[in-house]
Amino acid sequence: MSPSTLRRAAIAAALALAAGGLAACGDDDDGGGSSTSSSSGEAKQIALLLPESKTTRYEAKDRPAFEAKVKEICENCEIIYSNADQDAAKQQQQAEAAVTKGADVMVLDPVDSASASGIVNRAKQSDIPVISYDRLVTDAEIDYYISFDNEEVGKLQGTSLLEALDGGDGKSIVMINGSPTDNNAKLFKAGAHSVLDPSGVKIEKEYDTPDWSPDKAQQEMDQAITSVGKDKIDGVYAANDGTAGGAIAAMKGAGMDVTKIPTTGQDAELAAIQRILAGEQYMTVYKAITPEAEAAAELAVAIAQGEEPPSGLVNGEVDNGSGMIPSVLLKPVAVTKENVKDTVVKDEFVEVSELCAGEYAADCKAAGIE
Ligand code: GAL
């Protein structure tokens, strides 16, 4: 095997692992010897457009993993990076700037899944292929889509919450969903409802949280506590760790014992895992972002160089309203106190030295993390 074939096989294997049963994996490597690295000719420009910086994943994980992978496999590639700080108009301008700079491919994680079709149309005018990254751009002719199984994320959250509530029948919860302009948030919500609705749990209040803002989630929870009553809330569905943090702060502020009120989350942020170890948050959803970002980098480099995607990478298709989009779909994992050690710690998604610092040392010890 050539080094590039080996590398592809390794990535395909990692993805197959991450994607579990979903991966249509096989060892049908094309063996065509086409290399993903190139050292001659004009530099290839790869635009990476991320949506926001309040959720820690984007700057701390997606960006560095993507950049490192591109650097590793393509000497001759340059990255045009931008972060839209949750502003769809700003993202539109950043995309325009990337087109002007001569992007050969655009990796786009949209702030607004619907209005980003304008960005895709603009890219297409200049013959720039677009990879929809993590969030689906709807009703637009994107070339590829890479994400986790997002309905599954919602199902994991809902199922965990019901487990923590002894099945949920007769219990009362508040639902704090994500941003109404993020297609993923719709899928998380749909997945969660698919398990919560038939369970007999009572959804007392439900909110969509603009911009995924933790502050707004806190206000929503304050409002729910006032209207439902602080003794009548048994659990909280929060769509990600940022909104979970807001909801938990509101409950603490109202004098509620958050160790008795299970709250869900997503993203396995450091602060959330610490809350889980301390018993303040019940669960999070771990999405192995490095393989997601690396797959996007592999795909982007191949496309920028006018090649086919590495074999084994694309493992499904998703309907975005304009057609079936070849997709790379990865598998999310539910994390509670019981498996922090065997998931995010084992994968070094979080640093033990950071996780177990200061007041969390004892909680780490109790969870067998040292
Ligand atoms: C979603 C993403 C999540 C989370 C959230 C908040 O689209 O899939 O991982 O980060 O946005 O920005």
Image: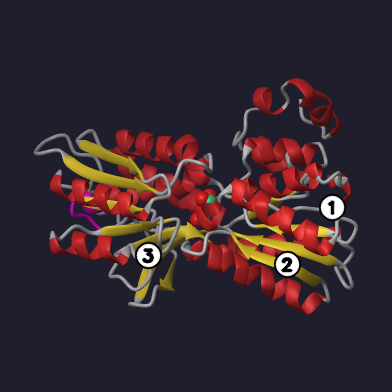
Q: Quadrant of residue 203?
A: bottom right
User: Compared to 342, does 136 lie above or below?
Assistant: below
- Colour option used: secondary structure
Q: Mark 1 points at which residue?
A: 261
| Separation of marks 2 and 3 at Cα, in angstroms | 29 Å
Foreground: disc 2 or disc 1: 2
x%, y% of residue 170? 89, 72
* Disc number placed over residue 101 in the picture, else none: none
Viewer can see residue 303: yes
- In the visual, does 84 lie left or right of 192? left
Which is nearer the N-term, disc 2 or disc 1?
2
Q: Mark 1 Cα within 10 Å, few/some/many (few <14, many 20+)?
A: many
Q: What element carries label 3?
A: loop
Q: Name the residue under label 3.
A: 137
Please give the range of residues in magenta: 301-308
x%, y% of residue 340? 73, 41
| Separation of marks 3 and 1 at Cα, in angstroms | 36 Å
Viewer can see residue 285: no
User: Compared to 216, does 327 lie above or below?
Assistant: below
Foreground: disc 3 or disc 1: 1
Q: Which amino acid does label 2 sit on?
A: Lys
Q: What residue type is labelled 1?
A: Ile
Q: Mark 2 points at which residue?
A: 205
Does residue 305 show up magenta in the picture?
yes
| Separation of marks 2 and 1 at Cα, in angstroms | 15 Å
User: Compared to 138, does 314 lie above or below?
Assistant: above
